[in-house]
Image (cartoon, grey):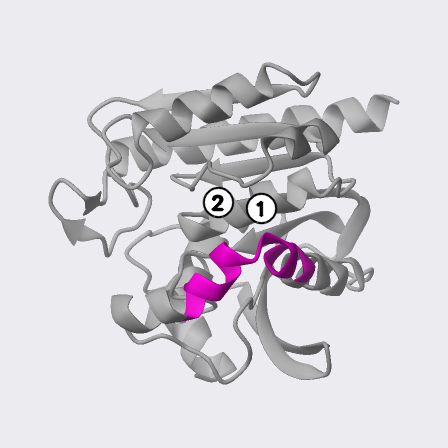
Amino acid sequence: MNRNTLIALLLTSPLGLAHAETRVERIDYRIDGQPYQGLLVYDDAVTTPRPGLLMVPNWLGATERAAEKAARAASDKYVVFIADLYGKDVRPSGPDEAGKAVGPLRADRPLMRKRVQASLDELLKRTDRVNTQQVGAIGFCFGGGAILELARSGAPLKAFVSFHGNLDTPNPADNGNIQGRVLVLHGADDPAVPKQQVDDFVAAMRQTEVDWQLVSYGNAVHSFTDPYASVPGRNEYHPVVAERAFKAMNDWLDQAFENQARQ
């Protein structure tokens, strides 16, 4: 996977929202001495620093398809850094390999938080492109659950947005550590995030003073923002809901960053 390949892919993306100025840069970094590689996605037509978004992708990791989604989220408003939570040499080719890669992180939430935080630190180094006073985090599927764990660690970001992400956590009281606004965008018929998990999340958040919202989209299952998801009734793209969800994300982030600017 090289930079030119990624740019060409973004220009012909089925999302239809990337354009000629979209750039994708591979960023090498280290966690506990081991190599990791994330992707920085931005529109270089805008030269002033913009708000930054840490993006944790689905369980397939920092792939070309993740870069497509980051380009849709970024447009010309944000600089997005796609986190690598597995390591530079771990790139799952399908669900079986992804399950093996993600399992240790789901079983060890402190380790998950550590790797997400290290990836956030890389984004915050990009002061030439990122307004480090306006930073949020977004995540998809597994990544949605991962950015919620970052929030529960007390990371001082302005906003967190989870798209069809896991909502469970071994320590629900940690929701009280959240400092930013939390938006959960959920498919009402998502079999991967069952009703009990949703109910437990809502109950835990009600015990906090966090500014949070959960939007449940009717007739949507898991992966509703993913154009490549095609398992009916389980993982399935829903273009109408995807459009609504990205608009909800933008509105949420706009409010968070505008409120911060007034303070």
Q: Which residue is mark 1?
A: 147
Work out whether residue 39 or residue 21 is closer to the camera in this orientation and state it. 39
User: Of the numbered discs in the image, which one, if any, rests on residue 261?
Assistant: none
Density class for disc 2 (Cα within 10 Å; few <14, some 14-19, many ≥20) is many
Relative vertical location of residue 6 with respect to residue 67 in this rendering, above or below: below
Magenta segment: 101-114
Q: How many marks?
A: 2
Q: Position of residue 147 (x, y in %)?
A: 58, 46
Q: What residue is drawn where x is 46% and y is 80%?
A: 90
Density class for disc 1 (Cα within 10 Å; few <14, some 14-19, many ≥20) is many
Mark pair 2, 1: CA separation:
5 Å
Q: Quadrant of residue 180?
A: top right
Q: What residue is drawn where x is 30% and y is 76%?
A: 93
Work out whether residue 139 or residue 27 is closer to the camera in this orientation and state it. 139
Asked if the magenta segment contains residue 110, the reply would be yes
Residue 244 visible (yes or no) = no
Q: Position of residue 225 (x, y in %)?
A: 33, 44
Residue 69 visible (yes or no) = yes
Q: Is residue 139 shown left or right of residue 27?
A: left
Q: What residue is drawn where x is 54% and y is 63%?
A: 21
Secondary structure that dominates the magenta span: helix
Q: Are marks 2 and 1 in contact (CB under 8 Å)?
A: yes
Q: Which residue is mark 2?
A: 144
Disc 1 element: helix
Relative vertical location of residue 22 with respect to residue 254 in this rendering, above or below: below
